[in-house]
Amino acid sequence: MEKGALFKNDRGRWEFNTERGSVELSCGSVVEIFAFNAWLRGRIEADRQGYCFLHENDTDVIRDLAGTLARLPEGARARGGMI
């Protein structure tokens, strides 16, 4: 599974680079991030404050994702797609 460090692109969306190219994440993109010493599954959502990670429990939100490792779960595809 390819992974990379998240950064905000010029459109304000979270993105990470892999050997095959960049993966841009937009609303509804299913993604796993490495935080609190574990891979957490959730999705990218947006509100007035910008894009954030919403844990699969639908209550925990992480906004500052800069530098956080991310990967697409098996079979998942970024809604923003490969760039």
Image (cartoon, rainbow, N blue to C red):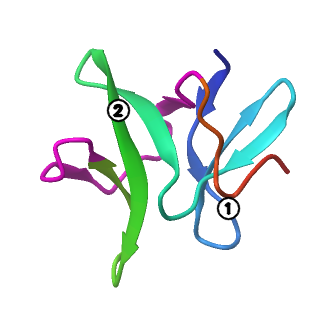
User: x%, y% of residue 79?
Assistant: 64, 55
User: In screen coordinates, is 55 left or right of 29?
Assistant: left
Cα separation, mark 1 vs mark 2, equals 22 Å
Q: Residue at x 49, y 64 (%)?
A: 27
* Mark 1, other Cα within 10 Å: few <14 / some 14–19 / many ≥20: few
User: x%, y% of residue 4?
Assistant: 63, 28
Q: How many marks?
A: 2
* The magenta segment: 55-74
Indicate whether residue 64 is drawn in magenta. yes
Q: Nearer the viewer, residue 35 or 82?
A: 82
Disc sitting over residue 9 in the figure: 1
Is residue 47 placed above or below 17 in the rendered structure?
below
Occupied quadrant, residue 57: top left
Q: Residue at x 57, y 31 (%)?
A: 72
Is residue 26 placed above or below 40 in the rendered structure?
below
Report the mark closest to the observer, 1 or 2: 2
Disc sitting over residue 54 in the figure: none
User: x%, y% of residue 67?
Assistant: 50, 37
Callout 2, which amino acid?
A: Arg
Q: Residue at x 60, y 54 (%)?
A: 25
Is residue 50 placed above or below 77 in the rendered structure?
below
Callout 1, which amino acid?
A: Asn
